[in-house]
Amino acid sequence: MLYTRRGDDGTSGLFGGKGRLPKDCPLFEALGTVDELNSLLGVCFAKAESNKNEEIVKLLRASQEDLFIVQAELAGADKKLEQSHVDRLEGEIAKLEARFENPNSFIIAGGSELSALLDYARSVSRRAERQVLAVQSDHPTSSETHKYLNRLSSFLYAAARFAAASAGVEEQKPSY
């Protein structure tokens, strides 16, 4: 069955049955935003796959897997990201950066459909990072998780620039 009725009273449980909390508590906001980001990465994945952009496809799938670990840790499971996850992401950022000219500026999203989706995911990633950090006093996560979430938005920025460059699109900077 896809429903349990246990949440009908406005509460939800955490990993391992560690009690129930109101669905509008900051922890569920953080968990929901990480889930939203993971879903959005799925949209980016599907678009990258349809564009035959295999490099981005592989990187996005790895990031989705990593976000499941973040959610598990946040919910109280004995799971956490390792420094190797952060190192891998930093390495992928460096590889992508070497393949396009760094604009050294903000970019107006929408150069290509994939780059726009990746820019959208980057902004959701920043929100997820803020919300995970906001619940640290009651629901702590590792420093590797904090580093990873910070790097993820940088990765998504680099992936967006790479996607636009791969599509032959000249992206626009804001005119202010």
Image (cartoon, rainbow, N blue to C red):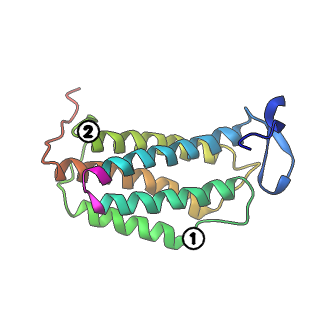
User: What amino acid does circle 1 point to?
Assistant: Glu
Residue at the extreme bottom of the image, as rendered: 84
Which of the numbered marks, if any, corresponds to residue 82? 1
Name which residue lies at 23% across and 26% down: 176
Give coordinates of residue 51: x percent, y percent. Answer: 25, 51
Question: In the structure shown, which secondary structural element does the residue marked by tag 2 occupy?
Answer: loop
Give coordinates of residue 123: x percent, y percent. Answer: 43, 40
Question: In the structure shown, which secondary structural element does the residue marked by tag 1 occupy?
Answer: loop
Q: Which residue is mark 2?
A: 107
**Front residue of this view, candidates 24 and 104:** 24
Q: Where, by quadrant of the figure, is residue 62 drawn?
A: bottom left
Q: Earlier in the sequence, mark 1 or mark 2?
A: 1
Give coordinates of residue 130: x percent, y percent. Answer: 56, 43
Residue 5 seen in render:
yes
Which of the numbered marks, if any, corresponds to residue 158? none
In the rendered image, residue 51 lying in the magenta stretch gets the answer yes
User: What amino acid does circle 2 point to?
Assistant: Ile
Q: Where, by quadrant of the figure, is residue 117 drawn?
A: top left
Q: Are marks 1 and 2 in contact (CB under 8 Å)?
A: no
Tell me: residue 78, above or below residue 108: below
